[in-house]
Image (cartoon, helix red, strand yellow):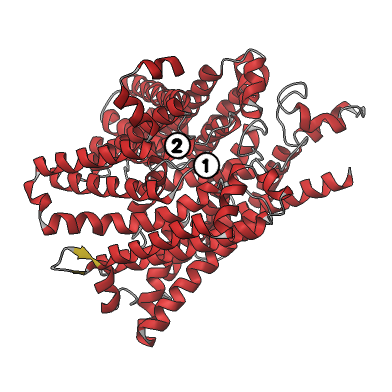
Amino acid sequence: MTTDPSAGAGGGLPESTASGVATQPTAPRRLDPTLQVVRRYAWPIAVWLLLGAMILWYSTLIPQFTDFQVTSIAKNSLPAVYLALAQGVIVIAGGVDLGAGALMVLANAVSANLMEGQPLWMVTLIAIGVVLGAAALNGFVGYVIAVSGIPDIVVTLATLFIFTGIALIVLPTPGGGTNGGLRYVFTGAETGVGTNYWPSIAMIAIPTALLAIWLGRTRSGLAIYALGSDENAAHLSGVNIRRTKITSYAVGGGFAGLAGVALTAIANSGDPRFDNAVNGTLNSVAAVVLGGIILGGGMGSVVGAAGAGIVFFTLSPILTAMGVDPNTGQVVRGVVIVAVMVVAGLLQWWRRRKQ
Amino acid sequence: MNEVATARPHWTRQLADRPLAVLAVVLVLLVVATGVIEPGFFSVRGIRNTLLFAAPVGIIAAAQTILMLTRGIDISVAMVGTLAAYLVASQAANGIGLAVGWALLVGALIGAVNGLVVGVFRVHPLIVTLAMSAILLGLLTQWAPTRFRGATAIPSEIRTIGGGSFAGNLIPWNALVWAAVAVLVILGLRRTGLGRMVYAIGDNPVAARLAGVREWQVLLAVYTISGFLAAVAGLLVAGRVGSVDLRLLEEFLLPSIAAAVIGGTSLFGGVGSYTGTILGALVLGVLNTMLTYLDTGQAVEQVVFGVIVLALAWAYAVVQRRTG
């Protein structure tokens, strides 16, 4: 891996672990504790500040900025956030999952198909089942990668086709439905349209926080960072490589499944189109990169990736408000990703020269 | 591992030492199986259809093979090829030569941009080409109903090369283009300085740099070649389909990467050859024909294709580990 945008700055992890080499030069200097936290989380903080600035800008662009717009942004960015978290875990562990969007589409198709006309308790069971099923399925993908030694890109490119194929078999045309209760949990209204933004914001904040805490504070979470940082070193320090790889894919799969369930709740239907899967994957990789997680693994924070997921989502309403073709959003997204990586590369080169 | 291998019967060890022979056997088995499913496969039409699919796959896979040898990959090939097809359709009125020239030039230029970002700014190729894909998709979605409106008809010359055939309707013209590409790529990788440098920087970038290879120039060159080949494939597919749409080359992206992988080219650089990739593209071509004959529908086809690609890649990884 040659690029390393946030060396020593974008980590969401204790300095004693994975990023040891990269952070060493700054370690001897004693900093004010608050400043240290800001430094360590500089990248995710910058992403969330960018998001705040964008929403502020958006509020000046449109005639009326009310609770309705806040709710709309919060609920509609849920699938993007979950997919960014899914991709985040997997990329931190040193992999990349091109099939994440397809797993979301599959979960969307299955849940919309099963949930239609069911009572709330049944819908809840189905939602849990779909998330766990997606986790198990992607855990198997991780197992295949770990055992076969085929590169992640090839295996997950294959699952991109396999999962969308299964989704098409389950739900040949857009359709299905869900229960108002589930819609309330994700969108804040049983009809899916409303001004109550707290449920959506909670559904963004709680899973993101839980995942970040698991990754940064527990043994198995730190093993993910260790694996992505240096597989040999992780193995020598007693990390079970195969199990950690499988865990990263299973957790990522669970979040992709959650993204699918959220999609069902928001749209009240399932949509198995291949484009949805490809766009989902593209956006999740973009969010991970802008969020400061380094492709190749070992560094970065899922909190940044979640923020970046919302940033990319917010782009299209802003462009629409400015009277620009929303498809320009796709172009802007591509340019932003490359620009971020180029700037990060230059920063790193400059820092290395300075030393 | 080694002891087990020597204890094996003679012929399996021989096979394990020659992974390409294993792939050739797979190809023959697939051909026989397809013939059993549909005897018409051994007709002129069956062979022609297989080659019609395999040729564009093989041409894009040539780009992937060269890039994988340098530890790279190009996800943007599908969109680059689609853009080239749109350009030809919109420029056709100005003469076929000019239109094709423009399309190939733009393809190569986009490839060069990829190469510049990968080579000079050291950004991961997966990110660069994914982003390029997103940019091109965004532009084409906007341009299809505006700038490229009415650009749906493909010139008849390209229709002939992309979908027509000669020698008693047996060999499609696009297979001839593929053969030309194959000769150039194989000779280029084996006999030219650039070819050696491609293997060198993939095998050990540090050693290559110390030996005086300017890595960024090599990367710029190979990504430019990739963009050019993607444009060629885009024109061929557009010629076969006869019209242009945004999803023109979508179905060729996975096969192009898979062909190189099951043909034995390592994504980690330095190992592989285009000969293996050609076999891989033929295997996928026969597989595609077989699935068409089985007439299972798009969804099942997608699943089976993905599973078989995985199985072949896995088998190859196992064989490779046993020999290495």
Under tag 1, what secondary structure?
helix
Q: How crowded is mark 1: few (under 14 residues within 10 Å), some or many (20 or more)?
A: many
Answer whether labels 2 and 1 touch (C-beta < 8 Å): yes
Marks counted in the figure total: 2
Between the C-alphas of marks 2 and 1, the distance is 8 Å
Front residue (pair B37, A228): B37
- Give residue B152's position: percent from left, percent from top: 31, 73
- Residue B123 drawn above or below residue A146: below
Q: Is residue B177 visible?
A: yes
- Three-letter code for the amino acid on which mark 2 is drawn: Ala
Of pointers 2 and 1, the one earlier in the residue sequence: 2
- Residue A334 drawn above or below residue B29: below
Q: In which quarter of the image is the N terminus of chain A?
A: top right
Say which residue appears at 65% left-offset and 55% top-offset: B119
Residues behind callouts 2 and 1 on a single chain: yes
Which chain is indicated by disc 1?
A
Q: Disc 1 marks which residue? A: A284
- Three-letter code for the amino acid on which mark 1 is drawn: Ser
Image-based side of A246 in relation to B165, left or right: right
- Residue B96 drawn above or below residue B221: below
Under tag 2, what secondary structure?
helix
Say which residue appears at 25% left-offset and 35% top-offset: A170
Which chain is indicated by disc 2?
A
Q: Is residue B1 visible?
A: no
- Residue A46 drawn above or below residue B109: above
Say which residue appears at 48% left-offset and 24% top-offset: A146
- Give residue A218's position: percent from left, percent from top: 64, 15
Q: In the figure, residue B112 lies in which quadrant? A: bottom right
Say the numbered circle drawn on residue A100: 2
